[in-house]
Every structure is written in structure tokens, then in C-alpha cells.
Image (cartoon, helix red, strand yellow):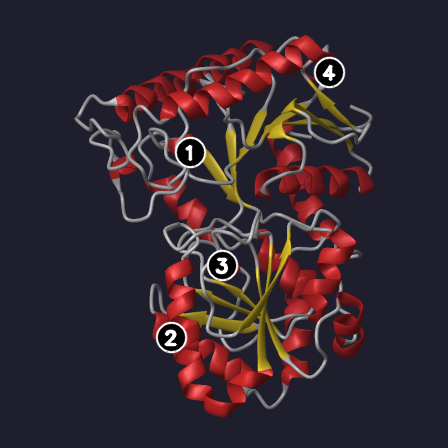
Amino acid sequence: MDILKVVHLNTYDGNGGAGRACVRLNRALTDQGIESKVIVHYKFGKNPDIGDFNTNLLQKGYIAATIILERILAKRYLKALKTPFSFAWFGRSVIHHPDVEAADIIHLHWVNHGFLDPKHIAEIAKLKKPVVWTFHDSNAFTGGCHVRYTCDHFKNECGNCPLLKNADPDDQSHKIWKQKRAAYDVLNFNIVAPSAWMQKSVKESSLMKGKTVEQIPNTLETDIFKPMDKSLAKEKAGFPKDKYILLSGFMPSRKDMHKGTSYLLESLELLKERLGAKARNIELVVFGNRNTEDVPEFPFRASFLGTIGDDERLSVCYAAADAFLIPSLEDNLPYTVMESLSCGTPVIAFTTGGIPDMVKHEYNGYLAEYRSSESFANGMEWMIHHTDRERLNRNARQTVMEKFSEEVIATRHIELYKHILKI
């Protein structure tokens, strides 16, 4: 084998955390001399280096229709909760694509929204090639949900799903669970868990018994997401230089459980009470909001940047902030945390999911007690009054360079590939 060939399969090309992780890993592997390619189910962008399975506009239109149809049909079965859940109604064959046929390793990423249903996952076994699958959320080992919260049904056989309108032991979640079990009996694959939390969850899953799971984090472009002088960055971002800037990512409505908006609002109210007159020195900046019609009322002056599609611009915003807030209640290895740290900006978050893999308490940020608004407020207050902010900023960047840089993560993947191929 002269050059190792890896093909990455993902539903989308770079939008969403999984898509970004897939594209970033591909770049990191290419920089290390690996022949690495990304092929997607539906391509939004125009990057010529990313391939897709659709050969014409008619086919692409059909795929778009199935993605939309799945969401519409799902409403008949799901309760009115904003917890993501995928059904296995649509799928497509990938085994005849020339890049898939030529690959030494097939690396799966996020494969929902009508891409790889259990039947077509099992079909990959016909190629007799090693398969690696990075679990960017919990869906691969549940009966449909992507975020589990306190539900532990995945440890046995899913059923009586708390997300379904008509839950019973043989409901849709149990049927999907059985389909996945049948597929995984056919296809052997090696699992990559980006966080210790995900690795632990995989080991607890009944569907993953006997599977090999390796913990390897995601990576990012450390040459783009990098520190800047705070004053210069604030000027470039258009933030007031005389304010302490609290930055936060996508801000959904108060009802969205997954992102923990209600806890952030409560903690900001507490912070304002504690700071008194000094509260006027604080400003909240939010990016990623799709509109300003459904955003909550904040106790501090708040500005909304909308979706930022340019990573250079996003990097400047991170670097300009004094602290990054993420009140998420469950996340695998959220990119916003890694990006902020890489730009030298400490993070305040709940102790949940894979966040503790990145944020070290009172070293490069603050880990608040889970679902405690008071603890989250403590974190903001601690950071605002910290006597050596520069040290926090340096620690943030150093964490990323030591644990998540492109070279480090690419090397770990290459070692895994070579181990699987016995070369």
C-alpha cells in the first residue's frame, strides 16, 4: 500500500458540528499525506474537493424532498419537544461510488436525514473493507433520539420512548432499535468517540456490545481560530472596548431544552443583582441566532450578530470576547467551546457531556454544577473578577494546541487506521 486512502461519508458538507468535524479531519489528514476525500448525501457548498452522491439536479431535488418529507412525517409521531429524533424511513446505497470502492478505509460520520438507514449501513459489509464510525451524537446506538438526557433505555432495548406520542414497548423507537441491531450484526465497524462521555455511553449501550471504541477528539483550524490582542480584536469586531464582553453562540427560544437557555437567563439575572452598578460594564453578544423575533429578553445590553458564515470573522469575535458562555445541557464535544479556547478566550459551561474534556475548572474556564443557574452565575462572577485574565487566555490556547491541534488528531486517526489494516 503506497498511500493510505480514506473516504469520509457525511450527510452534509460542513454545516453542523459533525459536518465541520468531518471536513476538518479530512483537511488534517490530507496535510499528513493521506489520500482523504469527503463524499456527502446533500451538498450545500461549492467546494470542489467535496464530492456527493447526486449526479444531476433531479436526483438532488429528490434527496432534498425526502429530507423535508421526513421532518414533516416525523411530527405525526413525536411530541412537541425540541429534542432531535431521526426515523429510518429513507436511505441510499453508497457502495458503487468509485471513491468508496477505491478506499482502504470507509469512515462514517453523521449519516441521518435519509442518508444511511440500517439496511444501507449493512450493505457496506459487501465491500469487505474496514469501517470506522465517529459518533457525533447518540443516534447510532439509540432507537432514534440524538440527545438522551436522563433516558437510559439505550442500555437495554429502546421502547416506551419519552419522545413519542404513542409510546409502548414495541413503539417506533423499538422498531428502529431492532433494525439497527440487525444491521450491526452484519457490519463490523470500529467506533471513534470524540469525548470520554461518548465513549462511556457507547460502552453502556446494548447495541454496541463487542464493538471496539477509541476516544479521539475532533480537531479545528488552529491557524484560523487563533488569539489576537483583545483591544485590537474588539475594534475589529466592532465591540465596545470599555465593556466586558460575554459571548454566546446560537440562542434559541426559552423553550429549547437542549441549549439550556432558561438557565442562562436566570444566571444573568443573578449576575446583574450581584454586580449592582458595575453591571453597566457588561455587554452580551450573541451569534448564530436566525432572527431576533424569538430571542429572550436579557438583563444586560445584548446585540445579535446573526449567523456568521466566515470563520475568519467568527475567530475575531471569539478573540474579542472576554468569556464565552455555553449553557448546553448535553453535548458531545461542542465546537464553539474548542473554537473559543483556540482563540484564547476562556469558557463558562455546565459540567456535562464532553465539555470537561476541553474545559479544566478554574484553569481555562469554569465548570458550573449541572443545571445550576447560581453556579453558572458564580462562574461569570469569578471570571469577571479574576486578577490574571491573561493567564486564563494563555491556558485556553495551550489546551487546544496540546490536545486538539490538526497534527495531533490526524496522527491519532492514522495510527487507528494502520492498526485496523495491520500495516
Pick the front one: 156 or 75: 75
Which residue lies at the image location 48% right of the left edge and 39% below the top edge?
Answer: 213
How far apart in space, not on screen, are marks 1 and 4 (Cα)? 28 Å
Query: What is the number of the mark on residue 355?
Result: 3
Q: Nearer the viewer, mark 1 or mark 4?
A: 1
Helix, strand or loop status at disc 4 = helix
Residue 3 visible in the current orientation: yes
Answer whether labels 4 and 2 touch (C-beta < 8 Å): no
Work out whether 264 lies above or below 141: below
Q: Nearer the viewer, mark 2 or mark 1?
A: 2
Q: Name the residue that disc number 4 marks.
A: 102
Pick the front one: 88 or 420: 88
Helix, strand or loop status at disc 3 = helix
> Where residue 363 sits: x, y (%)?
55, 76
Neighbour class for label 3 at 10 Å: few (<14), some, many (≥20)? many
Inspect the image, locate mark 4, and give the three-letter code of the amino acid beneath it.
Ala
Q: Name the residue that disc number 1 marks.
A: 139
Q: Name the residue that disc number 2 marks.
A: 375
Inspect the image, locate mark 2, and give the three-letter code of the amino acid beneath it.
Ser
Which quadrant of the figure has residue 247? bottom right
Q: Earlier in the sequence, mark 1 or mark 3?
A: 1
Query: What is the number of the mark on residue 276?
Result: none
Inspect the image, locate mark 1, and give the three-letter code of the amino acid beneath it.
Asn
Q: Is residue 113 left or right of residue 38?
A: left
Q: Nearer the viewer, mark 4 or mark 3?
A: 3
Helix, strand or loop status at disc 2 = helix
How far apart in space, not on screen, are marks 1 and 3 (Cα)? 19 Å
Q: Is residue 128 left or right of residue 313?
A: left
> Where residue 300 sits: x, y (%)?
51, 74
Neighbour class for label 2 at 10 Å: few (<14), some, many (≥20)? some
